[in-house]
Image (cartoon, rainbow, N blue to C red):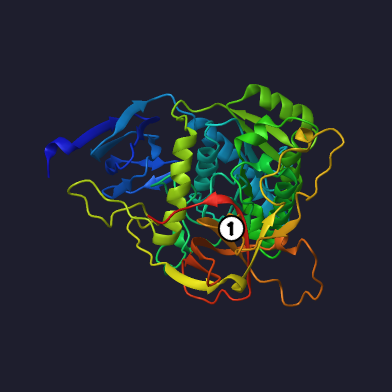
Amino acid sequence: MDAGLVKEWQLDPESEYRFELDPGESLAIKLISGKAEIFGAEIGEGVTYLFDSECRAAVFTWHGCELEMRKPSTEYVSDETTMAVYMNLHHAFEQMRVKALSASRNSPTRDDGDGVPSEPPRVLIMGPDNAGKTTACKILTNYVVRAGQGWRPMCVNVDPGEGAWTVPGTISACSVDAPLPTSSPASPLGSTSTSAPTISSSSALVPAVYWFGHSEPRQNILLMERLIRNLGDNVNSRHYNDPIGRCSGIIVDTPSSFATSTGEKKYALVKACIEAFQINVVLVVGHEKLAVEMQRTFGQTVNVVKVPKSGGVVDLDLAYRDRVHKLQVHNYMYGHHIAPPPGVPSTSGEDGEVTDMHLAPLSASINFDDLTIYRIGGGVMAPSSALPVGAARTISELQPVPVDPSQKGSGLLNAVLALLSPPASDENERYDEEVLDLTVSGFLVVNALDFHNKKMTVLAPGQGSLVGRTCLVGSFEWQDQ
């Protein structure tokens, strides 16, 4: 191995090594001695961890450690971190979990009367763009599952521009019982199995997923409100007979647009989240004015806590986000493979995550009428305030509009389709907007349209008949290259 590719860092207590990778670059990190963690997930001594796809992350140590790098990119060490703040928050939330579990078992604790509420922490994380909200969500989640109490916190993502466990355009929730790893921005909250077998703990995650179809919630606020309430109902039903899961709490990651709401429905989506997930704590990251507004607007029902922004947060532009979106769809179909630096085995990776998993999607030719396809609201919706005075919409924001593949203006070529779960068999009544309330069972991509023979070619992650299934289409496209 070329010694020039190997570099060592000696980290002092409560400092962190930060790195940023360029496109096409990978990085290998090994803990030589001491203890360290990546966004709250502990890393093992002597284990090599791989990172790629323009990953930005940090290795933090409470007591000091020695790290070995292979092919380092942009890097530096900082002793100004916000980890102590998150550890204090974790301890406060842990007290809430313990008291909530004791209350659910009618068991009094020595801490009764100390002012700590006997309900679990249900936390909403807010902040401006590039504030580190998802990192905060991951740190708090990882500290919970590392506590050794068998907690299973519900991690919720209501940022459709992020993708979380699947592809962009979705909102989702997942019960987590193992640390969420970090190796690529294409899987910010870990990964799930698609057409692959369940071969690691992270791929065993089974999120509840709803399709929004766009990257920005303001493109259809009414639809986003409805999906948030659906997701909240789904979470509550999962917790109904699961006292450990319920007492573990909820951590909700939000998009930056929640912090910049304007107009007559200002903070409508924040209110929807607070009600749907019964939020009792709002964390505001890096935005003092927003913290004041949250206190003024919701302070009577929730506790508002201001958290400083980490100096390691990197500003991400639209081009970067577009590349990540494309990578997320690619990884959903083909799996995640990290080409390691020279001398590093390709099977190395974080505990619980495989960084060399090849999937085999299927390309199938189907008839136009095999699938029923809808576009909600007819496409991207302008806000009501942008309509001419006295004008009314011809199509409502929540109206499912059928999409005819035989029409050349259908917009289906290269479109990402959300394959919906079938309606419950015991529900006899059907309603017009039923497709809005169905979860997603998988995703397809339309690779080709044959207008002459009325057939389309779709890429699917696995086998299974698509005849009679229902799909939703939004504004996301992807080309298989």
> Does residue 199 appear to the left or right of 477 in the view shown?
left
* Vertical placement of residue 462 versus 265, above or below: below
What amino acid is labelled 1 in the image? Answer: Lys
Identify the residue position indicated by label 1 in the image. 408
Give the residue drawn at x 72%, y 77%.
425
Classify mark 1: helix, strand or loop.
Answer: loop
Residue 108 in sight in this render: no
| Residue closer to the observer: 99 or 302 | 302
| Residue closer to the observer: 38 or 444 | 444
* Vertical placement of residue 236 versus 320, above or below: below
Image quarter of the C terminus? bottom left
| Residue closer to the observer: 27 or 95 | 27
Give the residue drawn at x 49%, y 29%.
82
- Farthest residue in the left direction? 2
Give the residue drawn at x 81%, y 32%.
264
| Residue closer to the observer: 163 or 78 | 163
* Vertical placement of residue 39 versus 242, above or below: above
Q: Residue 40 at what x, y percent from top left?
A: 46, 42
* Vertical placement of residue 204 versus 229, above or below: below
Give the residue drawn at x 48%, y 47%.
325
Residue 386 in sight in this render: yes
> Does residue 102 appear to the left or right of 427 in the view shown?
left
Q: Residue 478 at what x, y percent from top left?
A: 47, 53
- Farthest residue in the top direction? 289
Q: How would you rate the neighbour count of disc 1 (Cα within 10 Å): few for under 14, some for 14-19, many for 20 or more?
A: few
Q: Residue 291 at what x, y percent from top left?
A: 68, 27
